[in-house]
Amino acid sequence: MGKVALITGVTGQDGSYLSEFLLEKGYDVHGIIRRSSVDFRERIAHLEGKPHFHLHYADLGDSMSIVKVVDKVKPNEIYNLAAQSHVQVSFDSPEFTADVDATGVLRVLEAVRACHLEKTCRIYQASTSELYGKVEEVPQNENTPFHPYSPYAVAKLYGFWIVKEYREAYNMFCCSGILFNHESERRGETFVTRKITLAAARISQGLQDCLYLGNLDSLRDWGYAKDYVECMWLILQNDKPEDFVIATGVQHSVREFTELAFKHAGIELEFKGEGIKEVGICVKDNRPQPSDINHQTSLVGKTLVAVSEDFYRPTDVVNLWGDPTKAKAKLGWNPAKTSFEELVKLMVEHDIAKVAAEGAAAKVRTNLAEYLEKGIVK
Ligand code: NAP
Ligand code: G4F
């Protein structure tokens, strides 16, 4: 019999990669999904219907639903990835964020106890570098003090401590991975990296004029999500339950990410001005010029990136930089598998293809509408 894993947040970026990873390892993978008015789950659509992949309705805000799924599935491992994961949104919906990201963790732990699985079920909690918040040292490791700096981070801090508490109080194998930012072609479209790669793709194809961002000076340690899900699994295969920092150990600014993404899309930018007045101007237009897309006019001299106060946060975390020494030494994890440059490239290439495909589909629809109107096709 293979192992059984239960993933909360299976429809998210990490949940989808982790599902693929565990299926390849021979696991029976169960995921929890929420009722939504849209039934298409883009990130896991290719897994639905596979024999070892199962979905169950439950919600982290609903204790009974979690208890029922845990009791039915009887998992050997639970990966608690479900969360309201957007920091800026947590300022608009702080109570919901606390319910899911803080109390939700407690609900999962209690469900395991209620089902008497505390001796056999290992639990991974998706913790975050946001706990370091208004950072007290750089780079950050497992001993760096926490200073959460958003409603999201405060909620996640509760999740971190309740996992630690259950580990000590009830001898449960539950651990937190303190993951630094990890991105991919499946990243939500309002996180800064994906917002940038999609905009670079659209601007390069003449479908968007300008990208508006918030704090360009913010520094992050960005890794590739596909590499990070392996570490989640390694944490649960360890001899004893421990918490780990997962990061690349390399730091870049939002501005650097933007410059590189646009460069991959054939656009060289130069940044001028400061703060709210800063702009990114095109200084070289290296885009190929196929005849069938509408970017015949050069972008040189145009302002393609500008700053908008709308994307400033009431408090912002500006200096995240992780030290993955412990994960390297104890788990044998390689933090340098995908470099920053490779990550940006793969995201931009993906989005250029996506935008082009959407453009082509839209063109077919327009042509078809025209033909129908003219009576050419009936
Ligand atoms: P994501 O793409 O935003 O996915 C979040 C998942 O949580 C989605 O499947 C979502 O379901 C689910 N969810 C939200 N509220 C729920 C609820 N009440 N009940 C059940 N499911 C719920 O996030 P991600 O980037 O994959 O991140 C995974 C986890 O790692 C999160 O806990 C996040 O806070 C944490 N984390 C992420 C990073 C990062 O850089 N990505 C770094 C550190 C920690 P729907 O599809 O139905 O919305
Ligand atoms: O991409 P972000 O929204 O990610 P953030 O806030 O770091 O949170 C992500 O990583 C955390 C791990 O550290 C996770 F726990 C969390 O779930 C999530 O996955 O913003 C990154 C930085 C911020 O400093 C933000 O102020 O980019 C800055 N930024 C500048 N302009 C922007 C924008 N962020 C967003 N989302 N949109 C902008 O236009």
Image: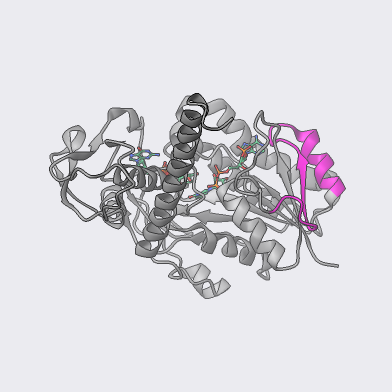
Which residues fall within the magenta stretch?
A: 47-72
Q: Quadrant of residue 27?
A: bottom right
Residue 214 image position (x, y, % from top left) = 30, 36
Q: Quadrant of the N terminus?
A: bottom right
In the shown orientation, is residue 263 left or right of residue 240? left
Taking 181 as reference, is 232 above or below it? below
Does the magenta segment cover residue 49? yes
Q: Position of residue 164 (x, y in %)?
A: 63, 51
**Percent of width and height locating residue 267:** 23, 52
x%, y% of residue 99? 62, 31
In the image, ligand 1 is in what quadrant?
Answer: top right
Name the residue: 46% across, 53% down: 183
Quadrant assignment for the C terminus? top right
Residue ranking furthest to the front: 376
In this rendered view, identify the residue nearer to me: 312 or 48: 48
Q: Can residue 33 be seen in this view?
A: yes
Task: Say if 332 sits above or below 286 in the image.
Answer: below
Magenta segment: does it hold 97? no
Is 120 left, or right, of 190 in this rendering?
right
Q: Nearer the viewer, residue 190 or 300?
A: 300
- Find residue 233 and report its image quarter: bottom right
Q: Nearer the viewer, residue 262 or 28?
A: 262
Left or right relative to 63: residue 37: left
